Amino acid sequence: MIERTVKTGFGAREPDFYEDLSDWEIEIVKAQCSKTLAALSKGKSLAGVIEVARKTADSADRLLEKILAKNRVALVCKIGCDYCCYLPVDATPPGVLRVAAFLRSQMDGAALSHMARRFSDSGPKPYTLDQDERAGFLAPCILLRDRQCLAYGARPLSCRGYNSIDVELCRSVVEGHRTERGDPSKIAQWRVVFHLGKVMELINLGMLAGLYRVGYAPARLDFSAALLISLKDPDAAEKWLEREEVFSGAQIRGGPEPGPRFWSRFMPEEGGPS
Ligand code: SF4
């Protein structure tokens, strides 16, 4: 089982990611913020929060497909290929709560407890590390079984942003023997693939901006750690809805912590959804 530290760079953010957003990037964040606010305006409930996560993932998938088609890029990702499931996965509370609800609908309490215990007992985890350290830490995701995801349809945006056009490159990164930068003739296609990762980040940011507007702290969570909290505490969703800091033990440490001025850039005008 892979569980060690290599310099993958995945999970790290550009130092100025939060500040140097172009106009079109700001538009993506704003659009997602408005959609999140519209969904939340129907009331505060777990079903509503799950709906926010589902709609966000659906619109992210549609945008991703559009970008791939426009640039004529074909991915090599397929069922049973799990290299990216060893990379750090960021998530938001709605994304985590959606996966927890999905698992509860598919597995009984004993199976869920077994999964949580098995993961807890299996050694150090990325969530014990700060942002820079976790960018080089490889560990299997809590949901990885037999090289497949137990909740693929409900997986977080971060996973949707990991894509590839070269499986050998993925293998070499994760197995720690990467020696070259890949096929230079594919640079333009790789740019598109990395762009997909950034688009997922922006959509995530839009969701966090919407949550911020209605009073939720814009938490960036380690997915496995946050899911573990959700599975162990049956009241986690209720507590989060009541703005308790139920996910504080899964929060990614370090990195920028944007303040009110940053978030205000993405808010709809007064009179819009709030
Ligand atoms: S949630 Fe699923 S797709 Fe994402 S890293 Fe975990 S196993 Fe892989």
Image (cartoon, rainbow, N blue to C red):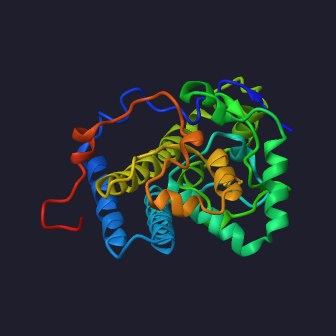
Q: Is residue 33 above or below residue 104?
A: above
Estimate the x, y position of residue 185 in percent, counting from the top left.
57, 37
Residue 17 falls left or right of residue 189:
left
Q: Quadrant of the C terminus?
A: bottom left
Asked whether residue 145 is in view, the answer is: no
Q: Is residue 3 above or below residue 242?
A: above
Q: How many marks?
A: 0
Q: As rendered, which of 223 and 215 lies closer to the eye?
A: 215
Residue 231 falls left or right of residue 268:
right
Q: As rendered, which of 36 and 108 lies closer to the eye?
A: 108
Q: As rendered, which of 196 and 189 lies closer to the eye?
A: 196
Residue 238 falls left or right of residue 211:
right
- Please give the name of the residue rendered at 69% of the width and 64% of the height, measured from the top-left corner: 151
Q: Quadrant of the N terminus?
A: top right
Asked whether residue 213 is in view, the answer is: yes
Residue 183 falls left or right of residue 33:
right
Estimate the x, y position of residue 273 in percent, counting from the top left.
23, 68
Q: Is residue 190 above or below residue 66?
A: above
- Please give the name of the residue rendered at 79% of the width and 67% of the height, measured from the top-left corner: 109
Q: Residue furthest left?
A: 270
Q: Quadrant of residue 155?
A: bottom right
Estimate the x, y position of residue 23 in percent, counting from the top left.
23, 46
Q: Quadrant of residue 249?
A: top right
- Please give the name of the residue rendered at 27% of the width and 48% of the height, measured from the top-left corner: 26
Q: Quadrant of residue 88?
A: top right
- Please give the name of the residue rendered at 85% of the width and 65% of the height, measured from the top-left corner: 110
Estimate the x, y position of residue 87 in percent, counting from the top left.
67, 40
